[in-house]
Image (cartoon, helix red, strand yellow):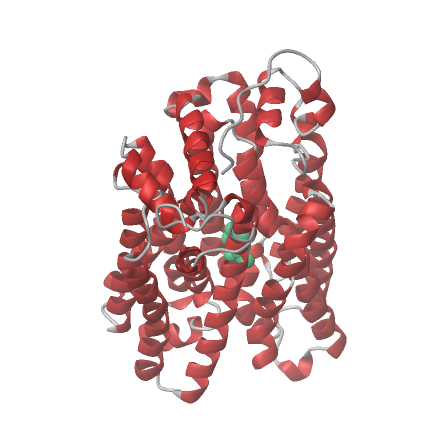
Amino acid sequence: MTNGVSVGAKPGSYKTIVYVICSVAALGGLLFGLDQGFIANSLETIEQHYHFGVHGGESYSAILATGGIVGALLSGLFARFLGRKKSLLFAGFIFTAASAVSALLPPLPVLSACRFVLGFGVGVASFVVPLYLAETAPASIRGSMGTLFQLMITIGIFLIAVTNVFIARTFPNPTASLPLMFLTITLFAALMFIGGFILPESPRWLMLKGRKEQAVTVLRRTLNTEQEINLEIEEIERALHGPQGAGISIVTRGYFFKVLLVGVLLQMFQQLVGINMMIYYSPTIFGYAGMKGLLAAMTVPTVNMLFTFPAIHLVEKWGRKKLLYVGAVAMLITMIAAGVAFQSIGATTDPTMISGTAKNVLLASAVLYIFGFAVSWGPVAWIVCSEIFPLEGREVGMTITTMVNWTFAGLVMANALSFMQAHGNASIFFVFAAFCVFAIIFVALFVPETKGITLEEMEFNLKNGVRLRNLGDRSSALTGGPRPAPSARH
Ligand code: BGC
């Protein structure tokens, strides 16, 4: 032992605190999912208590996204000035408070304000959790953390579907069931809040604030050997002497603007292919086709979670672009199929009047559609956005692209059902199918393959005017002038 630190610990063995760090931070992803998936199987119960109709339901659902936009906008400031740990504690606290107040079934404006606050917490957590993990977890597990976050979101969506269905069936009275549904969120939020106290602060943030001794103390808790600690300190110091986080003015630099556009469009399409219509309203939509019960309630969240697992492996094996194509084509075909099924169903919701074929096509389409999203656009949009920005503009780039994601998510949540009411149930599926086509064209023309290239090589390509879709080519990076200094990978 040296300074209380074991020398020569087995590679790949981590201290308990590392698991605590990953679990508490993963709870941030879980809460994202719990809030995102909450609506699907609680909408009917909320409607029974609050009687807000289709438009009211959409507004209540979508206000989460408005909170998410504001949270994402301010999260960079929180992370920088409060520190990563306090920002996580803050997110845990507001998740706990807002869901606990909702459980009291307050008047609708207060309930909506609580959902806004929950969205705010999700916005902060979706920025700070990956940042904290990237900065604090040992390097060898940093890569898998990005996918872990998405996996936790889908587990959260699944978990809340199970608990909400169970609660609604066990307690038919909304004044009993609704508080329990909200308290499920409170339970996990409180775990994140309390667990947050034992988290160490991010060593990178401590170094940024000139508190090297404290940073070393934290690294002693997380790393095994003095050698690892010294290497980490050197890496952080090198990164701190490299280009620093630029302000918003960086968007006016040509090279940054180009890559920002890729991130913005990627996040826009991630939402405009219609995922949150399915996540939020699939039980309602299945209901329009005369399907009720467990199948309608559980199909989407279950498939969504299960097919995020293969994505973890495929994203490195096949690469990002191939997955984006496969996903978009699957979603295109199934959106058209679902639209055609709804056309044959027409406006009737009487189950006895609806053909078995139409129902089966709809169900199969939903399964394949969710498969298409979960295995590709779900994780890949976030991964690519964390990879394409040069270090000095990564915070600005990720803040803007996250806000774009929430903006379009909100648009879909706020309009999907009323669009179906106004233009016929089939219409919206064709709209989303059209966006799948645009998404495919966009991927082909502008998205770089970021698999297997270091962030520094890509940055070098970007600043040397390489075309957007070739940014990930190693051959371009290897030719030509001086290479940028390596930087920390977020
Ligand atoms: C999206 C969310 C969506 C979730 C579904 C995420 O990648 O950003 O809007 O609800 O995937 O799993």
* Relative to 373, 89 lies left or right: left
- What residue is rendered at 30% in x and 81% in y? 175
Q: Relative to the observer, which residue lies in front, 239 or 267?
A: 239
Image coordinates of residue 409 in percent, x first then y, are 48, 50
Q: Is residue 178 above or below residue 99?
A: below
Residue 89: name its quadrant: bottom left
Image coordinates of residue 257 in percent, x first then y, are 51, 23
Q: Is residue 154 above or below residue 200?
A: below
Mark yes or no: residue 421 visible: no
- What residue is rendered at 68% in x and 56% in y? 372
- What residue is rendered at 42% in x and 88% in y? 170
Q: Relative to the observer, which residue lies in front, 102 or 125?
A: 125
Image coordinates of residue 312 in percent, x first then y, are 63, 54
Image coordinates of residue 21 in percent, x first then y, are 40, 55
Q: Is residue 42 above or below residue 241?
A: below
Residue 468: name its quadrant: top right
Work out which residue is located at the far front of the displayed protein and give it.
1
Mark yes or no: residue 298 visible: yes
Say how many tags the image has.
Answer: 0
Work out which residue is located at the far top of the displayed protein and give it.
481
- What residue is rendered at 44% in x and 30% in y? 234
